[in-house]
Amino acid sequence: MKSNAENKGLPKAPAHIAPFVEALGVDGAMAMLLEFGGSQVHLSRVGYRSTSAVAERLGVEKEDALAKVFGPGYIKVPLGRQWIAQVMFAQGVSINEIARTIRADVATVRRWGLIKADMQLDLEDWLAGKTA
């Protein structure tokens, strides 16, 4: 799991995604959402030798981390596409690559307005002809 210092500069996870980030870190949460987003998955109790899809694809350690946060049983995994897009953009990934990764139209990703805060010009600079 990544510390807050390692996540600095990345967008904050919305409430429905925050437990996944808490359990798996940002990169692990993104992998979980991309792999299982939109479906229900079963989490075995912590320490149980599981053969679930989560354990097979992400590893037993990550399934245990999720079970510690959510408890054992079925959970619904959100899609989280807009948050994933924001994180990827903050990491320097191109809009086209983001669109391919999250399976969205590039126009949709552009419409989300993925702008790095430190690159955004204020109106006076823009009127003066400065560029980012």
Image (cartoon, grey):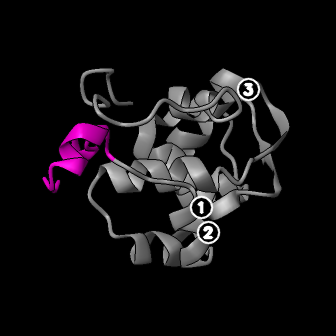
Q: Residue at x 41, y 70 (%)?
A: 95
Mark closest to the chain's N terminus, 2 or 3: 3
Q: Residue at x 57, y 62 (%)?
A: 111
Q: On the image, which quarter does residue 97 sit in?
A: bottom left
- x%, y% of residue 1? 39, 30
Give the numbered dot on residue 67: none
Mark closest to the chain's N terminus, 2 or 1: 1
Amino acid at circle 1: Leu
Is 128 rendered above or below residue 24? Answer: below
Residue underneath mark 2:
108
- In space, the residues marked 2 and 1 are separated at their CA atoms by 17 Å
Amino acid at circle 3: Phe
Compare residues 42 and 126 and report the one nearer the observer: 126
Residue underneath mark 1:
34
Q: Is residue 46 visible?
A: no
Q: Mark 1 or 3, which is nearer the eye?
A: 1
Where does the magenta region start and end?
A: 116-132
Residue underneath mark 3:
70
Callout 3 secondary element: helix
71 horizontally vs 89: left or right = right
Amino acid at circle 2: Thr
User: How many marks do you count on the picture?
Assistant: 3
Mark closest to the chain's N terminus, 1 or 3: 1
Residue neighbourhood size for the residue with mark 2, other residues' Cα within 10 Å, grouped as few (<14), some (14–19), many (≥20):
few
